Image (spheres, grey):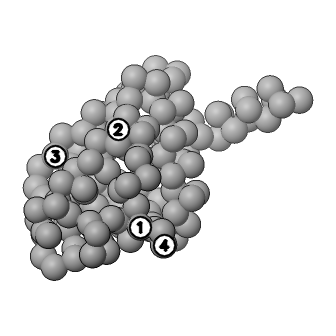
Amino acid sequence: MTERNKETARRFVRGIGESELPDDLFAADFASWSGLSGDIPGPVFRERAVMLGEVFPDGLTFELFETIAEGDHVALRCASTGTVFDGTPYRNDYHYLFTFDDAARIRHVREYMNVQVAADIIRPAFAELMRRKAQAAG
């Protein structure tokens, strides 16, 4: 089971980069936590992950370093690079800690990163997208 969980964790990270997170990755009770945002309900996390595709129109490229599994937990360390829609370059380091159910679906993920980089680049980009959407809605 640990190899299957490790592959699911890798699929999750690749999906973040491509803004595509298939339903089969997630348990029904999926939830998350981020060093930037704290507790995030599963549906909100998935909505934000899709919005990353708008923040990074060319996607995020992830380099995976280590993936370690024990029991129902997987730890994955990686780094991402990308370019924000306004041309701002982005790079960050991550550590994800996953908890899986018996079907190798993600029940919980904790995302650790350099929160200052994310706050300085991603947070304003999300705010600008929300402003644009509100303006377009009238």
Judging by the rendered image, the residue that carries numbered circle 2 is 17
Q: Earlier in the sequence, mark 2 or mark 3?
A: 2
> How many residues crowd around disc 2 within 10 Å: few (fewer than 14), some, or many (20 or more)?
many
Q: Is residue 53 left or right of residue 100?
A: right
SS at badge 3: strand
Location of the C terminus (image quadrant): top right
Distance of label 2 from label 3 (alpha carbons):
12 Å
Residue at which label 3 appears: 64
Q: Is residue 82 above or below residue 6?
A: above
Position of residue 100 measured from the top left corner of the image (x, y, whole percent)? 29, 71
Which corner quadrant of the image does residue 95 belong to?
bottom left
Task: Decide if residue 81 is on the left or right side of residue 54.
Answer: left
Choose between 20 and 112: the one closer to the eye.
Answer: 20
Q: CA distance from mark 2 to mark 4?
A: 23 Å
* Disc with the residue nearer the chain's start (1 vs 3): 1
> Image point 13% across, 59% down: which residue?
67
Disc 1 on helix, strand or loop? strand
Whether the residues at callouts 1 and 3 have beta carbons within 8 Å, the answer is: no
Q: Callout 4: helix, strand or loop?
A: strand
Query: Crowdedness of circle 1 by 10 Å Cα count: few (<14), some, many (20+)?
Result: some
Disc 1 to disc 3, C-alpha distance: 23 Å
The circle on residue 27 is 1
Q: Is residue 119 above or below residue 1?
A: above
- Residue type (three-letter) at the residue carrying disc 3: Leu
The residue that mark 4 highlights is 29
Mark 4 or 3: in front is 4
Q: Residue at x 16, y 46 (%)?
A: 64
Check disc 2 and give the amino acid type. Answer: Gly
Give the residue type that dot 4 points to: Asp
Between marks 1 and 3 in the image, the one whose residue lies nearer the viewer = 1
Query: Callout 4: few (<14), some (14-19), or many (20+) C-alpha neighbours within 10 Å?
Result: few
